[in-house]
Structure formats: C-alpha cells, structure tokens
Image (cartoon, grey):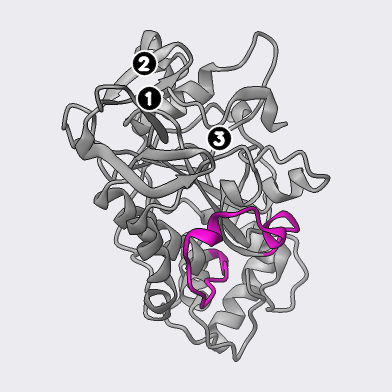
Amino acid sequence: MKTLRQGSFDPSVPFLKKLLGKAGYPVAVSPDFDGTTHYKVRQFQQVNGLSVDGIVGRNTWEKLMRTGYNFSWGTQDYLLEDDEWMHEYTEKDTIYLHHTAGLHRPDYTIGWWENDNEPGTLYRVGTSFVIGRRSLEGNDMFDGVTYRAFNEMYWAHHLGTKLKNNQQLNRKSIGIEICSLGPLKKDGEGRFYFQGHSKKISVPETEVCQLDHPWRGHRYFQKYTDKQLGECERLILTLAKIFDVPIKDLTYDRSWFDVNEGAMDGEPGIWTHCNVRTDKTDCFPQPEFIAMLNGLYLKYQDFELDYSELESAPMGTPKELDKSMLEHYTADLERKEYQ
C-alpha cells in the first residue's frame, strides 16, 4: 500500500477515505488528501495507539484494514474455517493466477480445501478467490461467479515452490483460482477426457482448447470461459488498484508462461503458477487468456473501484456441502506439497 500524507493526490486516497468512514471517521470521498483527511487520520491514530503524525504508512494501513476492510467487491463469501488460513496481515504486491484442475463449482473447491486435512493436521492451503464456470452439462449458474475463501489481506499456502523464499512468496501474494479441469487427453476415437485420482471425466469438444503445438507436454485443455476471463480481469484490476499491485506495460505471449526468475525472486506484479513451478500447467496459454492479459495495462489507467456493494453477504460454510462429492474436487492445491 502506498504511503499517503497531506498533499497526496492519488487513486489510493478515495479507498483510504472509505476505510476511515467505516472506522467511524467519515470524510468526503475524493482523490485529494486534504487538511480534513489529515485531521481524521490523526484522530484515528490517536484512538488506536499509533504514532500521531497524519501519515498513512504500514501500521496505520494495517489498523484501518483490520478495522474496516470487509468490502465484497461483487464476490460471495464462502469462508474457510478460521484455522484454515493465516490471520497474519501482510502487505500485498503480487497476484497469482491458478486453475483448479477440478470441476465447475467454486464452493466445492473451497469445501475440498476445508476437508482435505488429515486428522490432527492443518495444511492451510487455498486462495482468496475462486471463479466458477459453466458445468459440463451446460448449466451456467456458476459461470464467472466468484467465491471468496478468506479475506485477501491475510494468506494461505498456494504456491509450494520449494524455494527458500516460498513462505514469503505466499504471504505477499493474492491467489485467484479459475475452475478448470486443465490438461485433457484424447482417446483413439477422438473423444476428450480428464483423468485424475481414478476419475475419468468426458469433456465435450466445445469445452476444449486445442493448442497449435504441445505446451508442457499437453496440447488439449479445458478452456477458460468468456465469463471467467471477464471476471478474472475485473478481479485483477480491482485488487491491483486497492493493493497497488503493478500492472506492467508488456506484451504477453506463450513465452510469458515459462518459469520466470523475477517471479521466483518475488518481483511484484501479475504472475501465474507455472511461472514458479515447472510441474504445473496453470494457467495455460489459451489465446483468449493471453488477450485478456494484454488488455490489462490500458484498462487499468481508467479503472475506478466500484463501492456500490460495501459489505459481504455470508453464503454458508463448506460443511453444508455434499461430502460425497468433495473428494479430490480439485487437484491444484494438494495438501502437504504446499508447506
């Protein structure tokens, strides 16, 4: 988060003012850090035992976020149990994109994370956001619908890089999962299917992205839907604006999906799981996905946060799901490999 002070004129200032209002220190929302804002910040700092200087740095941001950051941003809360994620506030500067290697429902994806622990063991694996998709039968109830597993100012394991800085990479990043089976196979009769954990799932050809040539050993993938890509774009722009995650002016192509030293070193920005793992295929270079990434920089310049929905609406807990359907619902974030 940017350090703000009187005289700052920045897109982060309206968000600051919204947080001040939710903490009980209302001020007119604008991008100008004026004298009134300075006064309200000092009031907030004094009441909360912070250094009273009117400057919004890390400690003031943390207290404000813990006090009032419960915006829904158009998602549906489906929170993991409190012991399934780390309650440590961390400054974010990176967004990681994943796909689930699972079926279409975001609630069942989160439910599997909740139920995949061995007795007496907590792995705390998951991402903050999961974007649903159209079912294989054509039901679009969850297509482009985002469920939030936990508040993104906190963290859980979602990378499992085995690098020395693995924990730091997880702590400072926000994860977004896109529901997709991922790599597919093709049988001798030209039919596509997903194979994993003793499951064989037939996939209609209309759901298949066929790459011009294999990528990481696979040519066929269940493609991300248009609604998923639109929602992924919206989430990236929203989170980048809030947490000051840099969106770089670069050209995305197939080569961008290779392992990247910058990603492994913790360089801030937008990355995908395959940038830090050679054994992962999420996300894969679907042409429409690449086009979405290439449009981010220009769209970010004029993007404004939508404050129309300020509070999240709890939708239930994973315990209410059909446990017979939960087993290995997703394969992307599997237990102990992420520690």
| Left or right of 116 on screen, residue 299 | left
First in sequence: mark 1 or mark 3? 3
Say what amino acid the circle numbered 2 marks.
Lys
User: Relative to the observer, which residue lies in front, 241 or 42?
Assistant: 241
Judging by the rendered image, the residue that carries numbered circle 1 is: 194
Q: Residues under labels 2 and 3: Cα distance?
A: 25 Å
Residue at 35% across, 28% down: 103
Q: Residues under labels 1 and 3: Cα distance?
A: 22 Å
First in sequence: mark 1 or mark 2? 1
Judging by the rendered image, the residue that carries numbered circle 2 is: 200
Mark 1, mark 3: which one is toward the viewer?
1
Determine the image quadrant of residue 256. Answer: bottom right
Toward the right, the furthest residue is 164
Judging by the rendered image, the residue that carries numbered circle 3 is: 126
Q: Residues under labels 1 and 2: Cα distance?
A: 6 Å
Above-or-below relation of 245 to 110: below
Look at the image and give the residue range highlighted in magenta: 243-267
Say what amino acid the circle numbered 1 marks.
Phe
First in sequence: mark 2 or mark 3? 3
Circle 1 Cα neighbour tier, 10 Å, few/some/many (<14 / 14–19 / ≥20): many
Q: Find out whether residue 258 is within the magenta segment.
A: yes
| Left or right of 40 on screen, residue 228 | left
| Left or right of 206 on screen, residue 218 | right
Above-or-below relation of 109 to 157: above
Image coords of residue 310 (percent x, y): 36, 56
Residue 138 visible somewhere in the drawing: yes
Q: Main secondary structure of the magenta part?
A: loop
